[in-house]
Amino acid sequence: MTNPILLEVLRCKLEAIADEGARAVQRTAISPVVADAGDCSCAIFTPNGDLMVGGGNVQAHFKTGSNGIREILERHGSTLQAGDLFLTNDPYNGGGFHAQDVFIHQPVFIGGELVAWVGSSAHMMDMGGSVPGSFAPGATECYQEALRFPPVRLSKAGVEQSDIWSILRCNIRVASLVEMDMRALISGSNVIARGLSELVEEYTAPVFAEAVRELIALSEREMRRRIAQLEPGVYAASSWTEWTEELFLIPCTLTIDDDFMTFDYTGASPQSKHYFNSKPYVVKSLLGVEIAAYIARDLPFNEGIFNAFDVVAEPGSIMDADMPAPIGGPHLDVGQNAIEVGIRAMMMAVMVSPGSIAHSTMAGPTSGSGYGLHTWSGLGLDGKPDSWLMLEGGAVGSSAGFDRDGCDYYQSIVGKGSQTEIADVEILESWYPILYERRGPARGAAGAGKFRSGRGSSAAYRTTSAAPLFGAILGNRERVPIAGTAGGEPGALTKFRVRTSDGELSVMPCHSQGNMLEPGVTFEYDICSGGGWGDPIERSIELVEADVRHGQISEDDAARVYGVVIGDVARTEQLRQQILASRLERAEPALKPLQADAIPASAWEGASGQLHVGVEQRGSVAVSERSGAPLAISPAHWTDGCPRLVEPGGAKGHYQLVRYLDPVTGYALAVDVVAQGLERAFSTQPRRWTDAAEIAAREEAVTA
Amino acid sequence: MLNSHDQQAHGGADDYVIGIDVGGTFTDVVCSSGSRVWRAKAPTDPQRFEAGVLAGCDLVAEKIGISTESLMRKVSRFGLGTTAVTNVLAARTGRKTGFLTTAGFEGHLLGARGARTPNEGWLEMPWMPLNEDAVKGLRERIDRNGDVIIALDPADVRQAISTLVNDEGVEAIAVSLLWSFRNPVHEDMVASIAAEVAPDVPVFRGHSLHPQIREYERSTTAVLSAFASGALDGVDRLEAKLEQLGLAQPLLLLHSGGGAISLPEAREAPLKLASSGPAAGAVAAAEVVRAAGIAGALCCDIGGTSVDVAVIRNGEAERRQRAEIGGVVTGQSAIDVESIGAGGGSIAWLDSRGLIRIGPKSARATPGPACYGRGGTEATVTDAMLLLGFIDPDNFLGGGMRLDKTASEAAYARLGAPLGLSAIEAALGAREIAIAEMAKALRSRIASGGLDPRQFYIVSYGGSGGLFSAELAAATHVGGVIAPGLSSVLSAFGAASADLRRERSASVAECFPVEQAGIAETLQRLHAEVVDDLKRDGVAEDSISVRLEAELRLYRQKASLTLPLDGATLDQGRLLDEFRSIYADKYGEGALMTGTAIELSSVMAIGVGATRRAQIASATPGLGNVTSAAPSSTREIWLSSDKPLQVPVYATGDLEEGMTFTGPALFDAPDTAIWAPANTAIRVGAGDSIIIDFLSAGEIH
């Protein structure tokens, strides 16, 4: 092994260099999305495209660079030269998340030898296509969405290829702005290449390469050790991406086998005619960040993190689309649904593994599948055409944690906290022809639980321009909410509305373009949230009363959802008991009711442990912890013995809400959200549980 | 040391300039008169900080040989750096604060624009001293042009204030409304109604504290000001006591921006004192840099847990417009001091991969490093430096504390064992990693400022600064190192030397060409306002100088450049040329495309009142060939694990301006040590500064 001191010193230096690059990009870019909100990243890769280190705000971008470098190596591997600069932005050919995420890749040579790659990327204000900003939810083929580049040389051996700039400038809007931002990426890339060259020369290329290999191997080894802390087995979760009435199934089956995790999305809907078709490399990049937030937040974020898990998807499915399917947001709706179900599945493994490092930050899944980004274009304040992206629609509320309410305006309750900033009202009003009537956290009782979800953003604004504005909405979670965890209720939905001066409200669909905002009408939105944690009946009275006082929920909500009568402890206790009793009365019987006296004594022997929050495995029997009621015998799923309270969800019954109740007390052990006739959208099958029956049978045979 | 003074700045032979820094443990006092200087340290009483100040003054008077009363009568300037506001913010023990804002936007402050703070894996809301129950919306609205589109109803205001004061029990109120910097009429109305309804409750208005665009910063500034408004009680007591003793001059308080303000001004804007301690150090360092005739410097104050970094350019410490205070972005301008990386108390530990890491956990003062013998057993950076010979165990803090080298050795033996490293090897590694961590932080600062490090020196101070600076300079390509001779009382010296300084700014946000007359009017107004401010602080009109500045940026870009203005009438062509040339200098010709709109984001007037102040004499010209001092001893320093190097040690008391040395060498000061590695040239500069230059870049070991 290389000297351990050298490894740590080198890690510091690599991080310093990557950070220098990102800071250079942020200082020299001019579009607010990059300069102000910091939507950029700079990463360094090994000669074959493995991630060494990343710098900048958008950690999820770091790994996507590998995709581009591997594509470049395939196409141009034999002709690489020092001074080459590659541009790539096509998710089908070595790109990042979508066409607007432009990557600049630069090979770094020392003495004629390729020693590393630098990949810098940022979100461009426009990359052409049918609508300003290149978010084109109406597109049905990728050709309509944006100008896409496979890896092409912007500079060849240090000579700028002006032809490429010409093609680019000719095909995009606000070309000068985009060119400035792309040149900022080049500055950042050059800063890194310079620092890296000095570093490699200091250590010599062979020592550097070996040390980097070991740094990656060390992260991988530790990552695998932490995965091995999870109960091996199979954990599954499903959710749905929407396109008006159409639903697309995103199922994830997580298999934990010793020290490796496989997230298998087999069974996902076929690829669609909509922008949200995804790619496995996109999902892997996103998933790596979220997994790391739970189990590897202290580890250097490099290829080693990604070597410990894999993402499987069927070609031709919505998770791995082929050309010419649109691909304008593979990291948005479907991509975010995929992360959500992946993390939900992993959390089920964490719940049953008290020895896991993630046990101290148990929480519901990420809620990015409810983003409500929207764009506008029209005449700006100076009377000239302008177009912009309202990033604040990305401010979803997080799912709740096991011991705390969720985080407002954030898709996750764990992580590093580097989400892009919401712009001040005054900044937006000084830049764009809009005037806000209100902005703040979305109100209402959705996402209820012992701990409630965080709140998404909510606002109302009107145009101050005499001419109408036109825009597109890329939203999700308009109909089917994100389920809660451990008995928590599902989260809030995303809504866009227009209110005329007469107060007449009309809905703007979550996926739409060509929306018109006429002068004088008000545009309103509510961004969704993740679900709550635990049964709302268990929420402390004090917290419920504070929510009422702060206008978060009404007194009626407090009574209906939480069973709390404001200022009256005795009546609250009474009401809560009534609600629990009424649930059991209204519930459908369990699929396979289990009587305690029907269980052979031997079934209680053997392994024990957690099966779910509130459910314990005792030998081959699953038991509700609260009441001691037996629920199922291995290998049946623990929910089999729970009475089910089934309610139609949404105005048109787009989904069903299924509450799995403790048969004795009526507390909800799990609240499922299911659609398209699926019976259950989650399943937790640790091997300890599924094998219990077999082991018991074998032991019985021995005893006999 | 402060061996001579500029006659103009501080001429009278029989008057005294006093600078005081109230730190957490000690209160430092610097007193100078003519060519003489006295220093004293007294323990700080956290409950009654005036006690430490007065004790320090007594000590100084005793050293001078006069009574405290006669000293006070002859004081021509009394500067105070105080952590009173810092402490209230750190301990979160301020006044219960109520917040009034535009109805419909009540959540903007607690929402913190989506910024979240990681803590043990979780994401949490940034701290804000505000209970949601104490936030009330007022129905009113002013638009981007400053036009009232919904008028404020006084009855609503009365109702809201009465609820806050009577039901919520708030002790101070912050009011911050949308676009109030364009039209303050509603905020002013709230303040005057509050004065009627609740005359004992102080009100802080967003527009008067920070008249700039972005409601979030105006609101945080108003709320934190209200919260910290009780912190000055101790200063009031001190002023009364000093007056009794005969002090005829007003107390000058050092503010975060590196200038001094009067007590009444501090009462109106208490947040200005939030980070006056680090600012004082940077002001003094700027003075050191000026005296040494160097253009730019990176100040590295390496303490127990972090490196505090500030940048000095053109003889002045760089400020930032939106300083972070207690983790909250505010509108307060301040010397841009970033706390980053590792310090002496940072703990070396083995992470789960089996590699040594440094920090962020620190042993702090208690239990402290293993060698302090106060119960700490973990290996810290200070332990490594002791073990490697850089620190003299018998002479730490001027011999005030004996260090236990065997404890350090045991700690490092434990750390190194799993890796098969000896204690010395592990300590060498810890030192190297600590330097890499500090360098990372420094590089990040250099990169975000777009600085050319070769043009800079590191000014090192703080307990551990001198031991790391040369290696840090090499790792970041900085030209050299200056260790000021007065590093132990640098902040107190800063309080003695800061100018009286007032700033006023106005948001413009117009693209060039801008409307000439309007800007000129604004600048004239700001000019007149700072002159008035300074006159109110007791400065004679002929001692006031005013500088006008403009902030320019590419249209909607975040980073801006500050350019000096010749007068209220803008030479727009010159400004734009200057902007383009500086921009291209910083980011390269390719970064700036012709045709991009350039914006005048704000204008500012900075008034400086010339007062008596302490200064360091400039370098004596033509000084050379001063005989070098003989080493007082030699010490074994471990730079590799084979065997230690015999390094000459010089006592700083033996040094004189003009002496030269070559590295490797150690310079022992009473409270710190300075390490000059091989391949460096060392000279003693003005004010007993030790200046280290590299003989050939990057070749030090």
Image (spheres, coloured by chain):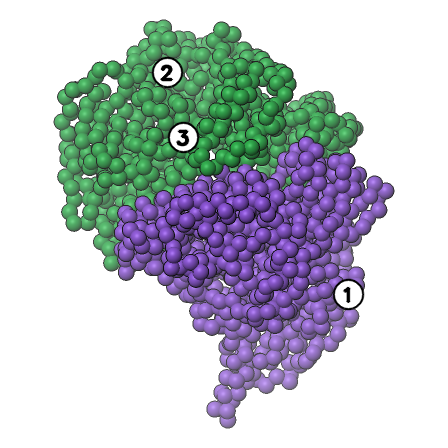
Chain colours: A purple, B green
- Residue B98 x, y percent position in the rendering: 65, 33
- Tell me if residue B413 can be seen: yes
Q: Amino acid at mark 2?
A: Ala
As drawn, which residue projects farthest toward the front?
Answer: A163
Instruction: Name the residue rendered at 56%, 40% in the picture.
Output: A177
Relative placement, left or right, of B426 versus A127 is: left
- Residue B224 x, y percent position in the rendering: 57, 32
Instruction: Name the residue rendered at 52%, 31% in the picture.
Output: B560
Q: Is residue A124 above or below residue B657?
A: below
Q: Which mark is nearer the camera, 1 or 2?
A: 1
Instruction: Name the residue rendered at 64%, 69% in the picture.
Output: A269
Q: Badge 1: how crowded within 10 Å, few (<14), some, or many (20+)?
A: few
Q: Which residue is mark 3?
A: B311
- Gap in Å between the C-alphas at discs 1 and 2? 78 Å
As drawn, which residue projects farthest toward the bottom?
Answer: A704
- Gap in Å between the C-alphas at discs 3 and 2? 21 Å
Q: Which residue is mark 1?
A: A653
